[in-house]
Amino acid sequence: MHQIQAALATIAAALNDATDANPIFLGTNEKKDVLAALMRSRTRLEELYLRVIASADDVAAEVGARDVAAWLVAQHRVESPAAHATLRLAQELEGRPVVRARLARGAFSLEHARVILRGLDDLPDDLDPEDLTHAEVTLCDLASEHGPKDLRRLATHLLEVVAPEVAEAAEAAAIQRLEEQAQAKATLSITDLGDGMTRIHGIVPETVGHRLRTYLQAYTQPRVAALEADGRVQPRSRLLAHAFAQLLENTDPTRLPAHGGDATTVVVTMTLDQLQADLGVAWLDDGTPISTGETRRLACTAGIIPAVLGGNSEPLDLGRTRRLFTPTQRKALALRDKHCRAEGCTVPTTWCDAHHDQPWSHGGHTDLAHGSLLCGHHHRRTHDPTYETIRLPDGRYRFRHRAREVLRR
């Protein structure tokens, strides 16, 4: 009988003896020892399993299977992805004798072995064989002291330990490869869902993601502004979505590339009566309808041109830059207001919009006497027809839901 067959027969007999054994009768220290021993034994059996798989091409050939993984799928109902992943691991271990020997002793887990193999594969192809062996031994030693997650992090600095003279150049080349791959894989889709919402899905290079995250964090309101109207805390994903909207609204269109022979702009079309009404509909340049309340709110920030039409659809007003508060005016408002002017709101002025106390559509002026700073949440309230906006004697804003007020009466 082959040694492997003899070992398996012994293991099977021993397991048969333990089939009815109840672990409840083990003491605490005994259970700890048994668990540690079982983990080592499981790893050793897994290594033996992989060793046999790596040499089982003849098993597949006998039945005409493509490889032993396909044979396992057909004969033993193993899931195909798992079977092929196991075969790849078995083949990789064939070229890593130190890793396989440590696994055979149960020194670390199979997950450790996968991390080690990935770390070794990431090394330069022209690395000296002695340095490569040193790297394999180093990772195996570290695997005995660290979990797979920490080992994965340590593996990224492996070259600095085994071959510091080539580490810097290799790291620079690896980073460049990653950046090139990221550029090649980058994708972004914008899909209108037909219910007033748009889904944005993208995979972008890490540097782009970091920049976007940094910009959005600058717009993310502090904790007091993260509360819903009913006092519940908004999820972070919603805060980031609102911050993304603010980022777009505050982007200066004159600094974007020309589009259609002109500066990149968003045009909203409405009649004068619609603009002055509490309720109404305006249209973006692609035909998407939005409320006139939203139009008035957007008109307080950069990034939108309202095209106001008269009775015969003649343009009465096309342009809005003269209605914007200048940076100097914003600084003056910040010095005066200190924070959002809504009652009880303490959002800093750096996260606020400059709001016209008297809407420009009703003859409002862009000056300090008729301007206030409001956070994004309360700025939307001023243009929401379901809320009554009350100006208090001290200049603060108070909001009252119209439907609730009617119910009280």
Image (spheres, grey):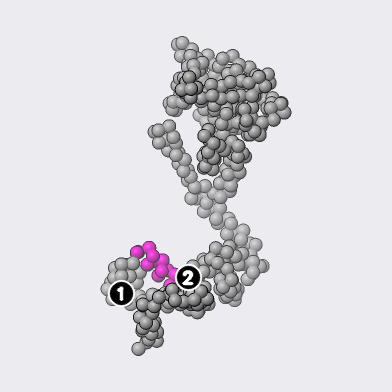
Badge nearest the viewer, 2 or 1: 2
Dominant secondary-structure state across the stretch colored magenta: helix
Q: Give the secondary structure at mark 2.
A: helix
Q: Earlier in the sequence, mark 2 or mark 1?
A: 1
Q: Where residue 120 sits in the image (x, y, percent)?
A: 54, 68
Q: Quadrant of residue 127?
A: bottom right
Q: Give the secondary structure at mark 1.
A: helix
Residue at 50 percent across and 29 percent down: it is: 260
Q: Amino acid at mark 2?
A: Leu
User: In the displayed image of the protein, which residue is found farthest to the bottom?
Assistant: 1
31 is higher (above) or lower (below) than 2: above
234 is higher (above) or lower (below) than 32: above
Q: Where residue 280 sits in the image (x, y, percent)?
A: 45, 20
The reply to whether the magenta stretch includes residue 271 is no
Question: Quick one: quadrant of the N terminus?
Answer: bottom left
Q: Which residue has dot 1 on it?
A: 61
Q: Where residue 336 sits in the image (x, y, percent)?
A: 71, 26
- The magenta-colored residue range is 79-94
141 and 308: which one is in front? 141
52 and 178: which one is in front? 52
Q: Which residue has dot 2 on it?
A: 110
Residue at 64 percent across and 24 percent down: it is: 396
The answer to whether 9 appears left or right of 190 in the picture is left
